[in-house]
Image (spheres, coloured by chain):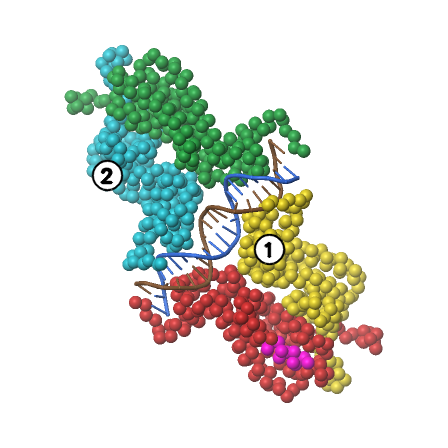
Chain colours: A green, B cyan, C yellow, D red, E blue, F brown
Amino acid sequence: MVKRAANSGERTADAIRRAGLKLIYQKGYAAVSMRDLAQEVGIGLSSIYNHISTKQALLVELLLEHMNSLLAELRPALAESDGLSARDRLLAFLLFHLRYHLTRRVEVFVINSELRSLEPDNLAEVVALRRAYEDELVAILQAGKADGSLIVEDPQVTAFALISMLTGVCNWYNPDGRLSQNAIIKMHVDLIFSGLSAPLPERQLKAG
Amino acid sequence: MVKRAANSGERTADAIRRAGLKLIYQKGYAAVSMRDLAQEVGIGLSSIYNHISTKQALLVELLLEHMNSLLAELRPALAESDGLSARDRLLAFLLFHLRYHLTRRVEVFVINSELRSLEPDNLAEVVALRRAYEDELVAILQAGKADGSLIVEDPQVTAFALISMLTGVCNWYNPDGRLSQNAIIKMHVDLIFSGLSAPLPERQLKAG
Amino acid sequence: MVKRAANSGERTADAIRRAGLKLIYQKGYAAVSMRDLAQEVGIGLSSIYNHISTKQALLVELLLEHMNSLLAELRPALAESDGLSARDRLLAFLLFHLRYHLTRRVEVFVINSELRSLEPDNLAEVVALRRAYEDELVAILQAGKADGSLIVEDPQVTAFALISMLTGVCNWYNPDGRLSQNAIIKMHVDLIFSGLSAPLPERQLKAG
Amino acid sequence: MVKRAANSGERTADAIRRAGLKLIYQKGYAAVSMRDLAQEVGIGLSSIYNHISTKQALLVELLLEHMNSLLAELRPALAESDGLSARDRLLAFLLFHLRYHLTRRVEVFVINSELRSLEPDNLAEVVALRRAYEDELVAILQAGKADGSLIVEDPQVTAFALISMLTGVCNWYNPDGRLSQNAIIKMHVDLIFSGLSAPLPERQLKAG
DNA sequence: GATGAATGAGGATTCATTCAT
DNA sequence: AATGAATGAATCCTCATTCAT
C-alpha cells in the first residue's frame, strides 16, 4: 500500500544516519532513544530496524565512516607537500585538519565524546583509525625534529597538544559568528608556529 | 545488617559523590544507573536517596564543586604575579591550570563531557562559572596585547585555543607513564610561548 | 507467544479500559498498579503503554466517556416530555437517572470517588460535564417552582439532595438481590414526590 | 537534648491524627505517604512510629473514633423523643444526623470513601458500627410504618435513600457559603417529610 | 520521644528489540 | 520497506517500615 521511489530504502537509511548523528551530537548516545530517532526521521519506531541492525551498529557506522573519510582526505592533502620540509608538511596538516574539523564539527564532536559508548571490539576498530591519523602528525613532527625545522621535544606529546587545540574549535566555532574560517585558521597556525611571546628588543637583550 | 557510625551520614554522602564521579567518568552520566552507583558505594539502591535528592542533583553538585574549587584556587595562584607583566601572569595561569588539571583529571573530563546532561537552569549556573574562569585568561591576554608583551590577535579565540590544548592533557596523561607532570608542563609552556617554528639563521635570511 | 488478530489493537485497548474500570472500582485509582492492570488484562506490563499514554490518561478517558454518554442519553430521555409540565419532566429525569445509574453502577461509583485523583486540568473538564448534567435537573426544578407544580425552595440545594439520594443506590444495589430495578425506582420516585409523612385526617385537621 | 512539656507525646499523637485526617480527606488514603504526614505534622518521618504502629492503624483509629462518637452522640439525641411518635423520632434523627454531618464533614467524607482501604478485619469492625447506626434509622422507619405515621414501603431501602441524601451535603456544604446550617437542615427535612409534589386544588380533585 | 540512615519491595514509565501483518 | 503490537529488562524514584543513636 505504501509506494516509494526505487531508492527510497537508501534515502531512509541516509535519513536515519543523519538524524542519528544530529541527535547523538545534541544529547549523547546513551540519551538518544530509538523512539527519538524514529520521530526525528519521521517513520515508525520499528521501521528503523529495516535499515540498521542495532543502536550500537548505527554509532559504529557513523564513527567509522567519519574516520575513514578523514583519513581518505588527509592523504591527498598531504601529498601536495610531499617533497617539502617538515615545516611545510606540518602547515599542510594543520590547514587540512582545521578546514575539515570546522566543516564537520558534528562528527568530530561525536567521535570525541562517544568513544566510551562503544563496545570493546568496536572501540578497538575506531581507535586504530584514530591512531593512524595521529601518527601522520607524529611522523611530521619527528621529521621536523630531525631536520631541525621544528622545535619539538616529544613528538607524541606535541601531537596530542596540537590535536587537542585544533579539535577544540569544534566546541565553539559558529559559522554565523563574527569570525571566518580563514581568520580562525590563521590565528591557530600563527599560534602554533610562533607562540605568544613577543620578541621585543629589550627582552632579547635581557635573554642575551 | 545495618551499619552505623558517628558521622556515617557524611561518610556515605562522600562515598556517593566519589563513586558518582568515578562512574560518570567511566561510562557517562546517562549510562550510569542508580543501581550501578549503589553497588559501587556498597549500599542499597534506595539508601542513596537519603543523601542526594536526584541523579541530576548529584551531577550538578559534582560540577559546581569542581568549578568553585577551580576558581577559588585560581585567585591566589594569580595573586602572586599581581604586579608583574601580562606575560608573567600568563605563565602563572598556565602553570596553575596545568597543575590543577593534571591533578584532577577526572573532574575535568566530566565537566567537559557532561554539560549536555545538565538541565537548562543547572547548565546556566555551571556555564557562568566556567566563563568566569575563561575570562581570567582572556583578561591576561588582553593585557598582554595592550602592553605588547604578548602577540595576540583575538584574545577570546586564543583563550579557547589555549584552554583546549591544556585541558586535552586530561585525556591521555597517565601518572604512571613515562613523563612527569613537570616535563609535561614545561613542554606545553614552551609550545605556547615560543611555538614550533625553529628560528634557524638560514630561514631568517630566506624570510628576510 | 505473541498473539495477533485483525483488530487486536482495538480489542486490547478495550480490555484495558474494562479492566481499569473494574480495578479502580474495587481498589481505588491510587491503589491500582499498572502491574495489576496488566495482569488483569493478561498482557505484559509494558504492553499497556501501546494503548494508553498514562495511568492518569486512562482514568480521564474512563470518566469523560462516562459523562459524555450520560449526557448524550439524557437529552433524548428528556425530549419525550418536552412540552409537558415541570413535574412530568422531573419524573422523566428521575426515571432516566435511576435506570442509568442502576445499570452502570461501576462507572458511577468511580466518578464519584476518583475526582480527587484527577490532575487539575482533567478535573476541570470532568467537573464541567458533571455540572452540565446537574444543571438539567436544576432547570427542571426552577421551572417547577415557577409554574407551581413543584415545591422547591432552593433548586440548587434540592438538585444536590436528589442526586445524592439517587446516586446512592449504586452503593448497595445488587442485581441479584431481593428487589427489582423497577421496585427500587418506584420507591425513590414516591419518596421524592410525596415524602414520608402520612396525611392522616387528624393531622390534616391539626395543621388546618 | 530535646525537651517537651509533660504531655508532648499526647500532643504529637493528636497532631498526627489531625494531619492524617486532613490529608486523607484531601488526597485519599492510598495517595497519602507517611512522608506527607510527617511533613504536615512537622516532625521527622520515623518519629511518626513512636505514636502509631502502622499507616493502616491510623486509618482504623480515625474511622473507629468517628463511628463511636457518632453512635455515642446519637443515643442521647434520640432519647429526648423517646416516648413520642415515630414521626417525631425520625425528625430527631434527621436533625441530629444533619447537624453532626454538617459539623464533621471531613470525617464523614473519609469514612465514606476509605472503607475499601481497610483490611478485612478492620473493615468488618467499622462496618458493624455503621450498620448499628443505620439500624437506628431502620427501626424508626419500621415503627412509623407500623403505627401509620410514616409512609414507608421498604424501611431498609428508605433508610439507605435518606442516609445517601443526608450525607451528600458533606460534598458541597461550605460554612462560608450563602446558606446557613439551619436553612439547609430545614430544606432537607421538608423534602423528606413532604416531597416535591405540590398539592394543587385541581390535582387533588383529579386524584379524588 | 525524636531522628537520620538504611532497606526491600514496588511505583509508573521507557528501553531496545522482535515479529506477524 | 513499513508498522502496530508485544515484551522482558531496566529506568529513576518513592513506599512503609525498622533500628541504633
The quadrant where residue B30 appears: top left
Q: In the image shown, does B201 or C169 lie closer to the viewer?
A: C169
Q: In the image shown, does D117 or C135 lie closer to the viewer?
A: D117
Q: Answer left or right for D141 relative to D14.
A: right
Q: CA distance from mark 1 to mark 2?
A: 67 Å
Image mark 1: chain: C
Q: What label sits on residue B77 in the rendered view?
A: 2
Q: Position of residue A15 (x, y in %)?
A: 54, 30
Q: In the image shown, does A92 or A172 lie closer to the viewer?
A: A92
Residue A57 visible at all: yes
> Is D82 placed above or below D19 here?
below
For the record, the magenta segment spans: D132-142
Mark 1 lies on a secondary structure that is helix
> Is C21 placed above or below D177 here?
above
Residue located 54% across and 65% down the image: D117
Residue C68 shown in magenta: no
The 10 Å Cα crowd at callout 2, few under 14, some 14 to 19, many 20 or more, is some
Residue at the outermost bottom position: D83
Q: Position of residue D199 (x, y in %)?
A: 77, 75
The 10 Å Cα crowd at callout 1, few under 14, some 14 to 19, many 20 or more, is some
Residue located 65% across and 81% down the image: D140
Q: Position of residue D9 (x, y in %)?
A: 39, 72
Image mark 2: chain: B
Mark 2 lies on a secondary structure that is helix
The quadrant where residue A153 appears: top left
Q: In the image shown, does A101 or B146 lie closer to the viewer?
A: A101
Residue highlighted by disc 1: C40
